[in-house]
Image (tube, grey):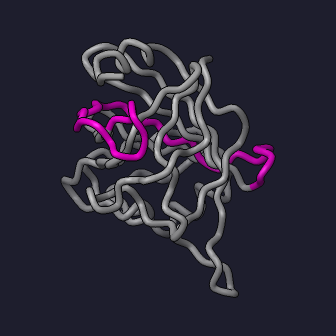
Amino acid sequence: MTDDQIKEIILGDWISIAPEVRPSISKNADGSLKPFYLTRSFTYQTADRFTLDVVNYADAFGKVPLVKIHIKGHIVWQGNHSLITGAQKVNFLADEAYEVIPLIQGFADAMNQIARSGFDKWKVNSAQSILGKAFAPFGLAEGQIFTEFDLIYVLNDMLFWGARNVDGRGFDTEENRPTNLQIPLIRK
């Protein structure tokens, strides 16, 4: 499929099938990577605009929500990805909105310890914009627009992005662009 065909097919709303697991850059006492759990809700709109809501959980079953991350921005299509015929390299730019919403007091308390500068007091269910701000928990520098170098692939009405690097590295450079597929999203 061409990027124009994919754009037409993915218009609309997509959600996680179930809670998903990802490697994080945080480590356990034994040196192994800590997992983190999440669900995704993605909307692709015309003019290459998207909205993504990610909810992180403390548990594998998605019963204890920690934080919601709300992102709005643009997709920049970069051409064919060599992983599989029909896959497209894309860059997700969080250039319209990037908000963090604590969903549990413990997470708000942690943010009040490590992300105080430039922010109001973190409160449960209260969104704060991190767009263009220094935000140490996500490794963002002042003025930086968060960008992920990713991929999109569609098969049987399932929307795939790239699988996270097993060592926890983000998709923050072309060299870190994924080379495998992640658990798919399904239509909402």
State which quadrant residue 72 falls in: top left
Name the side, left or right, on which 36 lies relative to 18: left
Q: x, y (%) of residue 41?
A: 56, 29
Q: How many labels does the image show?
A: 0
Q: Indicate whether 108 appears above or below 72.
A: below
Name the side, left or right, on which 84 lies relative to 66: left
Q: Is residue 94 visible?
A: no
Q: Please say whether residue 112 is one of the residues in the magenta stretch.
A: no
In the image, farthest residue toward the left:
143
Q: Residue at x 41, y 60 (%)?
A: 170
| Magenta stretch bounds | 59-88
Q: Residue at x 59, y 63 (%)?
A: 23
Q: x, y (%) of residue 80?
A: 28, 37
Name the side, left or right, on which 164 lies relative to 187: left
Name the side, left or right, on which 76 lies relative to 117: left
In the image, farthest residue toward the bottom:
30
State which quadrant residue 177 falls in: bottom left
In the image, farthest residue toward the front:
85
Quick one: 141 or 165, which is closer to the camera?
165
Q: Can residue 91 be seen in this view?
A: yes
Q: Indicate whether 120 appears above or below 155.
A: below
Location of the C terminus by quadrant is top right
Q: x, y (%) of residue 140?
A: 32, 60
Q: Which residue is drawn at 24% across and 48% down?
A: 145
Location of the N terminus by quadrant is top left
Q: x, y (%) of residue 26?
A: 56, 73
Q: Please say whether residue 78 is one of the residues in the magenta stretch.
A: yes
Q: Indicate whether 176 appears above or below 186.
A: below
Quick one: 151 or 143, which is closer to the camera?
151
